[in-house]
Amino acid sequence: MIEIINVCKTFDGHRVLENLNLNIRTGETTVIIGRSGCGKSVLLKHIIGLLRPDTGHVLIEGRDITRMDEKELKGVRMKFGMLFQGAALFDSLTIMENVGFAMLEHTNATKDEVAKRVKECLALVGLKDIEYKKPAELSGGMRKRVGLARAILLRPQVILYDEPTTGVDPIMGDSINDLIVKLHTKLNVTSIAVTHDMSSAYKIANRITMLYNGKIVADGKPEEIKDTADPIVKQFITGAGTGPITEGIDFEHLI
Amino acid sequence: MFKNIARLLGTRFIEFVKYAGGTSILLGETLFWIPMPPMRRRQIVEQMSKIGVDSLPIVSLISLFTGMVLALQSAYQMQKLGAEMYIASLVALSMTRELGPVLTALIVAGRTGASITAELGTMKVTEQIDALETLATNPVKYLVVPRFLALVIMIPLLTLYADVIGGLGGYLIGVHKLNVSHSMYMKMTWKALRYKDIYTGLIKSTFFAIIICIVACFEGMKAEGGAEGVGKATTSSVVMSFILIIASDCFFTALFYFLT
């Protein structure tokens, strides 16, 4: 169970998260939706301890990671895997070194053992024979898959996805969605994804949560979110240009 | 008007304090992580090759020409006094005490410092540094420490090399152009040099290495705003390194002058 309690975060005087409360249940896929720049990725980075809140707590299995030192945080992070928006593969390393990074860094595994596990993880995301290529030689979709292979290397308990389908074509996006569902079932992990792609959200989520103005404004099963009467959530999920979210915003000058 | 000036000065002062604090913390963290395992020998050697071996051609060229120019410029006055043989002492002392360390540091700051900032800056804006942290790896240990050790080892070695090549430049002009004999040139070079001249130069170059590494890594790791941000960070890294190298050179020269 991951508990986010009264978290506030401000950047340069702009409050991104405001007394945010959220519980992530173990074994579920929770999708956090919201407009670009609303703080979804910031929230995700709080969950893995990349950012510390100004006030509030983030509890992982009852332990507050906002008060942990480097060593304790390292132990927690070993239980997490994260897929970044642009995959964030290390340019200077091969795919083998990228995917096997955590094993090479933190375990006493031999090179053969690392290579075997890397091949297993790559196979799980539908890739093979690319171990000795560099990230620059791969397409955007392949890089995301490699990023996912890297995230699952140490058999994490929680996988975080930052905009998993952004920047890839719709077909590749859908195959990444399938992959997330497959990994969730196969590895029995807790998954948290942030996205503004509603088709992706409906496909992968057990639960959808909407972030708006630094707060959670909706939280429920995908069907409940689909049938919502809340005008803010309704505007977002239908992608309507007019409504409470865009009230007072003039798009005329963009035309 | 007065309010605006005060606000500007205040903002600049706060920025300065933030910068000084940020770089000091990074230096502290780097020193903390140096003795921690693993040693990452392969990365250190790679960085030493990038910083040291790859800088040899440019360091050779600039030191050689500096030594030659120094000999020619001093000959302009020395010949009037018939004291051409002292050109050897002047070149040797100027190179070891001042020009060797400073020129080498400026070359490395422009060449390697800029490349470190651009590399780390790109890693920052493409979230690779965040990815390192999520993989339970400390970015300072993984990225800064190997570069720090490589710079601290290679810059003093490059400085020694620049001293020798600068001396060679002076020798070429002194012996082949100004007709000072080979034996006299060598004698006047060794006669003028003291161990102190060499080690004070090396102490300076070690501090310059620390400045280059910390400024370059700090600027890279705080870069934001995509390609434009990386460009700005790289410019800022080179400019700041140059300023700090020249300022600390002045400080160390004064310190050694009064202490020794």
Image: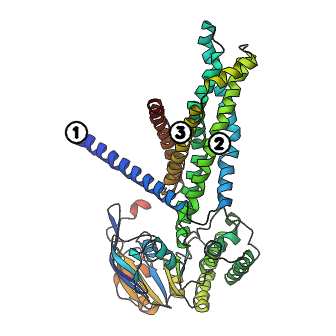
Q: Residue at x 73, y 80 (%)?
A: A116
Return the x and y of residue B83 as percentages of the image width and height.
63, 11
* Residue at (59, 11) in percent of width and height: B77
**Disc on the earlier residue, 1 or 2:** 1
Above or below, B113 against A119 in this view is above
Q: Position of residue A217 (x, y in %)?
A: 35, 82
In which chain is the residue bearing label 3? B
* Position of residue B208 in the picture relative to residue B54 (left or right): left
Q: Position of residue B71 (x, y in %)?
A: 64, 20
Q: Chain of mark 1?
A: B
Question: Which residue carries the number 2 mark?
Answer: B157
- Depth order, front residue of A103/B5: A103
Can marks 3 and 1 be said to lie on one chain? yes
> Marks 1 and 2: CB-CB under 8 Å?
no
Q: For mark 1, what is the residue?
A: B2
Looking at marks 3 and 2 on the same chain, the residue that comes earlier in the sequence is marked by 2
Q: Evaluate whether label 3 is on the same chain as label 2.
A: yes
Closer to the eye: label 1 or 2: 2
Q: Residues within 10 Å of mark 2 (few under 14, many from 20)?
A: some
Q: In the depicted view, which residue is nearer to us: B198 or B68?
A: B198
Residue type, label 2: Leu
Type of residue at label 3? Lys
Taking the spot 63% from the left edge, 26% from the top edge, the residue there is B92
CA distance for labels 3 and 1: 41 Å
Q: Earlier in the sequence, mark 3 or mark 1?
A: 1
